Image: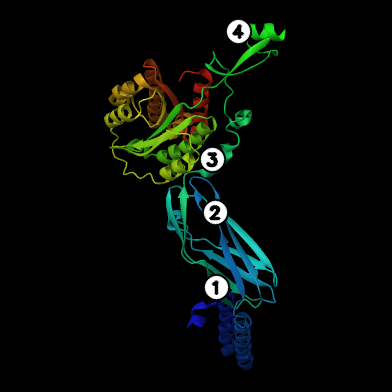
Amino acid sequence: MKFIKSLYLNNFFFYVLLGIIGLFVCAFIFPITYNGVWFLVLVLITFLMLDVLLLYVARTGIEASREMPEKLSNGDLNPVNISVQNHYTFPISIKIIDEIPFQFQVRDFKIERTVKATAQDKVSYDLRPTERGEYYFGNLNIYVSSPLKLISRRFTFDKDKMVPTYPSYIQLRKYDLLAFSNNLFQYGIKKIRRIGHTMEFEQIKEYVQGDDLRTLNWKATAKKNALMVNQFQDEKSQSVYLAIDKGRVMQMPFNGLSLLDYAINSTLVLANVILKKQDKAGIFAFSKKVENRVFAEKRGSQMQKILETLYNIKTDFFESDYSRLYVDVKKNINQRSLIILYTNFETMDGLNRQLPYLKGIAKNHLLVVVFFSNTELNEIINKKTDTIQEVYDKVIAEKFMFEKRLIANELKKYGIHSVLTQPENLTLDAINKYLEIKSRGIL
């Protein structure tokens, strides 16, 4: 039974069979060729039996395995490697059909290769998941053909393997080593001139050209008989909370990912930067209620705790309740903290409904509202107009874009910082804003 299930006739066999049928038709016109056609039938059967013998004489003709990360990175290209070891003593043609998780909706996956005798070959492809959760791979099917190419033998490997998809840890690794260095600006992160001084003293050092003369330490200068200056450092152990709105406004998709997943990916990277800067990072998400909470701390296991919490964020995209957010922040965050809120406002009316609660939070904390510009509107605005309808569409798009800028100005009036960004630039812009606040010492 296993033999029958693993045996497949190739297209080449049917082409040859079709040619023989054509020759039988011609034999009715030219009877002299009739016996010759039957001889070709016998040759075809002989080669068919020989092909079966070649492929099935070895119990383990090939070995194959699927190699992939322990977890997939959401929104990024994740490599999947397939290794094939040929144990046959002749070159084989293989067709790889991997049963990819249904979330990718790939119906025509196929890779064809030729592997030399007793050789090993590796093939790879990339997968880009667009939602968090569990991804189940089915069978790794490999169809092997001998040089005769009449039949294929199917081998099955790595059945039913589950791989979880986590927030974008590839971005996390990208910024990890740069988070506490001056190389950050190479990746689009701004260098910000320090305004004023923080009050956390670090050391006294000799004056070098470029040091601020206002920091001269005259007592140390008199003792050393050389100019000495006080050196200050960024204040550490400040609490930073990353709040994620997981309500209806974050459902909008961009390049396959929802705004919510962009916010989650950015939160993971920014939390790592915060901890590298010796601050305390915490997160929480909210819609109908506040949940998925990790209190701001600086312990070694904080990043793993944040990663697992972000992975488990679930939502039905209800309307967000900002009154509950205000009450929860007032109750649970007693120390003045930096709160970076990922949300989205499309109109001034939408902002005005939530503005009293945002103003209430900003009274006791430094609040930064991160919201998104609609990139589809940019396409409409930049598109050349040819009809009256397109002119109307362009004017309306410009009105909505202008309203986004009005929202940012309205927040600024009440001392609320804002970041208006495109989804693909979210992580860089959020890190920029955090570093700017640290450099200005306004927390």
Question: Sequence-wise, which precedes: disc 4 or disc 1?
Answer: 1
> Whole-Å distance between the Cαs marked 2 and 1?
23 Å
Query: Crowdedness of circle 2 by 10 Å Cα count: few (<14), some, many (20+)?
Result: few
Residue 62 occupies quadrant? bottom right
Query: In the picture shown, does residue 62 fall above or below 108?
Result: below
> Whole-Å distance between the Cαs marked 3 and 1?
38 Å
Question: Sequence-wise, which precedes: disc 2 or disc 1?
Answer: 2
Per the image, the residue denoted by label 1 is 155
Q: Position of residue 333 (x, y in %)?
A: 35, 28
Query: Crowdedness of circle 3 by 10 Å Cα count: few (<14), some, many (20+)?
Result: many
Apparent side of residue 360 relative to residue 302 in the rendered image (left or right): left
Label 1's element?
A: strand
Per the image, the residue denoted by label 2 is 69
Q: Position of residue 30 (x, y in %)?
A: 61, 90
Per the image, the residue denoted by label 4 is 214
Q: Nearer the viewer, mark 4 or mark 1?
A: 4
Per the image, the residue denoted by label 3 is 172
> Whole-Å distance between the Cαs marked 2 and 3?
15 Å
Q: Position of residue 153 (x, y in %)?
A: 56, 76
Question: Sequence-wise, which precedes: disc 3 or disc 1?
Answer: 1
Name the foreground residue: 12 vs 373: 373
> Whole-Å distance between the Cαs marked 4 and 2?
54 Å
Apparent side of residue 125 relative to residue 398 in the rendered image (left or right): right
Visible residue check, residue 372? no
